[in-house]
Amino acid sequence: MKEYAFGIDLGGTTAKVGLFTTSGALLEKWEVPTDTSNSGEHILENLADAIRGKMDEKEILTEQVEGVGIGVPGPVQNSSVVPIVCANLGGWGERNVAAQLSGLLDGLKVLVGNDANVAALGEIWMGTAKGCRSAVMVTLGTGVGGGVIVNGKVIDGTNGAGGEIGHITVNPRETAVCGCGKRGCLEQYSSATGVVRCMKKLLDENPDVDCVLRGKDFAAKDVFDAARAGDALAAREVEEMSETLGMALANIASTTDPEMFLVGGGVARAGDVLFDPLVKHYKEFAFRSCRETPIKAASLGNDAGIYGAVRLIVGE
């Protein structure tokens, strides 16, 4: 195997880029602004320029580079094609990313994955799940992302939608519409946005119950902080959110039977006030054989994507 590899985590504002050894040591990381003008037509050119510039700076030859892995915020087919437009990339998509970026990099090998799946791959390679062969990662941020790894391989699915955990239906009677157009998705309850939405609903439904959040603008962190401090209504929201998420994870366990669940994203920083009820409810819903599957906090943070992108390239 060659000496170096690059990992890219493409986001709507910036792309994180990492230079690695092929054994997984991160040598350097930096960010490249994501130019979404003109439907993102310059995105790949700018990434190629950034990689070529770093190779020139470090005097790295093309024949020393194993390849470039890239995680993108949308579905991916055959580790190469983004079949639809990515909403937060200015209409960019519908292209063979691997072929185009490779062409801009003198034929270097390029492999592409969904960003959440790639982050999960990073965690199983060098993060909390290091040493595991199979794991499921759930990212609780503005939305709910997910990545499924089975026997060391990302499960993309036929349509590139493997791991879209946030859009599992958990309440068929929900009337509010999810950002995806469905109703009752996990994302509507267990994301940071969902926690705030559900907390506001609880406040409206219980006007006579004292709550430190009443009459204030608040974020998901404030809900968890209030629950930790003993606020009864905030604690009820955290309990309900954890029950919904625990049920979803239990259903996933019956399908993929992972060695470990990883929870990442901003909401996961709530700590025990989230994880204690989550584990409790997971065990209530889980099939007996899966009941003791550990649920742990992810550890690579914002670097998970670049680690996983490199893992696409260096493989086993």
Image (spheres, rainbow, N blue to C red):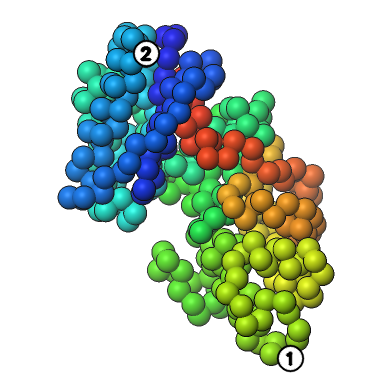
Instruction: Please state which of residues 215 and 111 is positioned toward the viewer in this rendering.
Output: 215
Which quadrant of the view contains residue 274? bottom right
Instruction: Please state which of residues 172 and 218 is positioned toward the viewer in this rendering.
Output: 218
Type of amino acid at the residue the image marks with label 2: Lys
- Mark linked to residue 208: 1
Q: Along the polypeptide, which appears first: circle 1 or circle 2?
A: 2
Question: Which residue is depicted at the point 53% across and 36% down?
Answer: 304
Q: Is residue 113 left or right of residue 299?
A: left
Question: Which residue is depicted at the point 19% across and 43% down?
Answer: 41
Q: Circle 2 is placed at which residue position?
A: 58
Where's residue 106, x and y in %? 22, 18
Mark 1: which secondary structure? loop
Question: Which residue is depicted at the point 58% across and 40% down?
Answer: 301
Question: Which residue is depicted at the point 35% across and 11% down?
Answer: 60
Evaluate whether residue 113 shows in this view: no
Type of amino acid at the residue the image marks with label 1: Asp
Where's residue 43, x and y in %? 26, 39
Where's residue 55, x and y in %? 33, 16
Q: Is residue 87 above or below residue 26?
A: below
Alpha-carbon span between mark 1 and mark 2: 65 Å
